[in-house]
Image (cartoon, grey):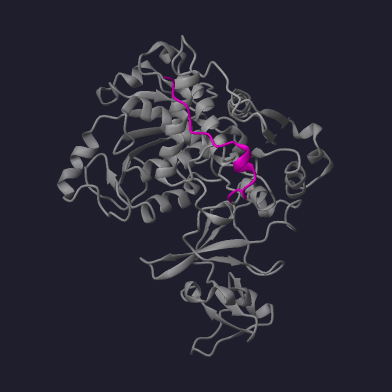
Amino acid sequence: MPWRPDWAYSTALMTKALPPTRHIISINDLSNKEIETIFEVAQGLLQELADRNVHYRIGRSTDLAAKSVLASLFYEPSTRTRLSFESAMLRLGGANITSADPAVSSAAKGESLADTIRVISNYSDIVVIRHPRDGAARLAAEYSQIPVINGGDGSHEHPTQTLCDLFTLRSKKKSLKNMKIAISGDLKGSRTIHSFVYALARFGATIDPLPAPGMELPEHVDRRLREEFHSRIVSKAAGRSEAGGAIDALYVTADQPHQLALIPEPEDYGFIVQKKTDAVYVTRFQKERWAEKERPYPKIDAKFMRDEKYSEASVMHPLPRVNELDVSLDKDRRAIYFQQAAYGVPVRMALISLLLHLHKNKSLQQYPGGFAEPQHPVYVQPIGTGITCGNANCIVCDPAERQYAANKFYIVEDEARQRCKLRCVYCETDINEDAAAHFVMADMTRKIFSFGLTSLARVAAERLRHFVIYRTAAEATAAGFQPRETGKKAHTG
């Protein structure tokens, strides 16, 4: 008998209160178990609805979402993401409404994203959004009554592309554990890469960066891989740990949470370096995110793939491609990028069905408030004063959104340095102290300030609202605060 999901879309269910709204903004909003659940549902849909001639293509439809409407809200160009989401909804039997050109929407009149999403929430049951600002999808979710799916926000993340990528790898390798993946191209500007490397690290992968010159992983992504996902930098040349950057080095990642090393003995790292690559993941130059429109850029072609270490490596690309992936590889048995694009439909069908509670599986309904519980306390900076996100492309820096997007930060403890750092809730960029910035905590109730953020993580949650953080003592002094009597003098320079 064909596979049938255990759908619970019945009159009895509709009389019950549905679980809280769930949003998917980052790949880290999903646990590994939840990702596997999505894949199980996607595989079941493929088994039931696949094209009879092309096994990886959805070729038939169902009426499972016949009472649901998807809104696609795209402020940037898109082909695969928008059309695969809309195809997924139509294949589920649902309907689509779309705003695919900001020039002919109310955005051209100056309407804020916050207002737009509140209106669209009345017209549909679920929304997928693409936006040029980092963190825009997170802001949209704060004002939405319905599930929000991030279809790509600035250079931040693209979580559903990563789901398609992982599903593709899983179909070839059967397991996501302990693979070795090379990633080539613009690693700095590609939101797809940022979601992808986080997911790979969580599944215990070894990541081999092959960046174009000057396009290495952003510093905050590199730091999270090392400090929070327990990746270790291993030199490809020497086969030993090194403290430098990721160029010509591997990220070797533990395959269990909080496990500090994948292999116990340093001499064994030579095996990791020499291990054949399971996949080469190619990305285009993200020219829309760079001032220079022409830069030296690596090209993956037949000559590159003749290297013995790539002999069994699948070739992947999120598409579109420009000149970074030679068309001569299209007929190579290792090329799977068009199959990868086809998998966007069943994977997004599965995600939509789970977010709309059409499926009885409860694994995506366990977190209240719409997001996975944050690992770190959240600090909200008083409006109009103190520190702001340092990412100029963050949604909080958009003049139209400032009144809706407070400067909010996760308080992340840096145990190695025995201090705290701030991470923007929207774009997830870290704000770190450096030689030019000596953060101070100002207590609004006592009008005094102290140096550093060491004690911020220990402040009770209800008291955080009484503090303002400044980059320097001079800023705090100018705002009317005095230094705490600690034997130190305030630096006002």
Q: Most extreme residue toward the right, as rendered?
A: 109
Q: Is residue 248 visible?
A: yes
| Count of marks placed on residues | 0
Indicate left or right for 73 with 275 as reference. right
Q: Closest to the observer: 293 or 415?
A: 415
- Give the answer, above or below, for where 486 lies relative to 124: below
Name the residue: 62% across, 44% down.
Answer: 147
- Give the answer, above or below, for where 139 lies relative to 380: above
Name the residue: 38% across, 29% down.
Answer: 169
Name the residue: 39% across, 23% down.
Answer: 315
Indicate left or right for 69 with 52 as reference. right
Measuring from the top left, give residue 449's x and y in whole percent.
Answer: 58, 81
Q: Most extreme residue toward the top, as rendered?
A: 53
> For the stretch drawn in magenta, what is the main secondary structure?
loop
Q: Which residues are magenta?
A: 1-19
Residue 390 falls in image quadrant: bottom right
Q: Which quarter of the rendered picture does the C terminus lie within?
A: bottom right
Measuring from the top left, give residue 396's x and y in whole percent.
Answer: 67, 54
Measuring from the top left, give residue 262's x and y in whole percent.
Answer: 24, 47
- Give the answer, above or below, for where 211 lies relative to 368: above
